Amino acid sequence: GNSVTQMEGPVTLSEEAFLTINCTYTATGYPSLFWYVQYPGEGLQLLLKATKADDKGSNKGFEATYRKETTSFHLEKGSVQVSDSAVYFCALLPRNDMRFGAGTRLTVKP
Amino acid sequence: DAGITQSPRYKITETGRQVTLMCHQTWSHSYMFWYRQDLGHGLRLIYYSAAADITDKGEVPDGYVVSRSKTENFPLTLESATRSQTSVYFCASRQDSPLINYNEQFFGPGTRLTVL
């Protein structure tokens, strides 16, 4: 079946630290891959996406590369800010319904 | 208001009562979805709809009923609420097009439901 596995949190970093949140997936075919972000009390917002192998999605300093050979879509940011504190969800879209990972809570301390 | 809205934003009910959560989108997106968010489980799909009058089960449909008589509305009903249905519920919509690889899914602000 189609599923997503994310690294468990919570993750706590100091401002300007490097961030990696691991995401691996299981899917048939060629799904699109996404990272969504959820700020406290809000719904999910699309952060970035990639629709085919070797695509790199990027937004607001965050990047993720669609690696078909390792079935991964790890989220990275070179220098996190306090405002990046949120819950991050990896997701895949195989056909109709999007499947989400369990989410990783990131806290960035000044 | 443009976008996707949910009502109510907060609801407290008792075991055994019927509850309906509303979802409305103004984009005429073809797809609409209901998810529940629980700690440790992320978002799990309850039901989705590809178009008006077309609905399908997701991962956790038991205890829920949906309908979609109009494209813009997708209500979710808990026919007889149970404590295990205490959760945050998110509605989402998406417009798929064969011409454009555009498949961003937009989420509502969520409804926090507590079943006592």
Image (cartoon, grey):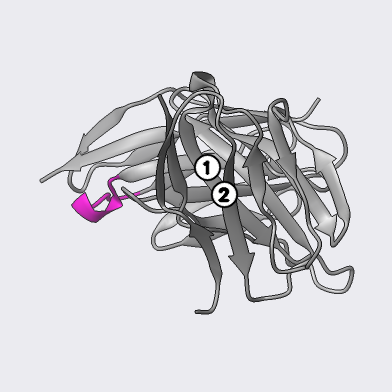
Counting from the top left corner in percent of width and height, residue B9 is at 41, 53
Residue A49, located in which quarter of the rendered image? Answer: bottom right
Could you tell me which chain the residue with mark 1 belongs to?
Answer: B
Q: Which amino acid, by three-letter code, is at mark 1? A: Tyr
- Mark number displayed over residue B103: none
Mark 1, other Cα within 10 Å: few <14 / some 14–19 / many ≥20: many
Q: Which amino acid, by three-letter code, is at mark 2? A: Leu
Q: Nearer the viewer, residue A74 or A10?
A: A10
Counting from the top left corner in percent of width and height, residue B100 is at 81, 72
- Mark number displayed over residue B21: 2
Looking at the rendered structure, the secondary structure element under dot 1 is strand
- Mark number displayed over residue B89: 1
Residue B107, located in which quarter of the rendered image? Answer: bottom right
Q: Nearer the viewer, residue A42 or A13?
A: A42
Asked if residue B39 lies left or right of residue B108, the reply is left
Counting from the top left corner in percent of width and height, residue A100 is at 61, 37
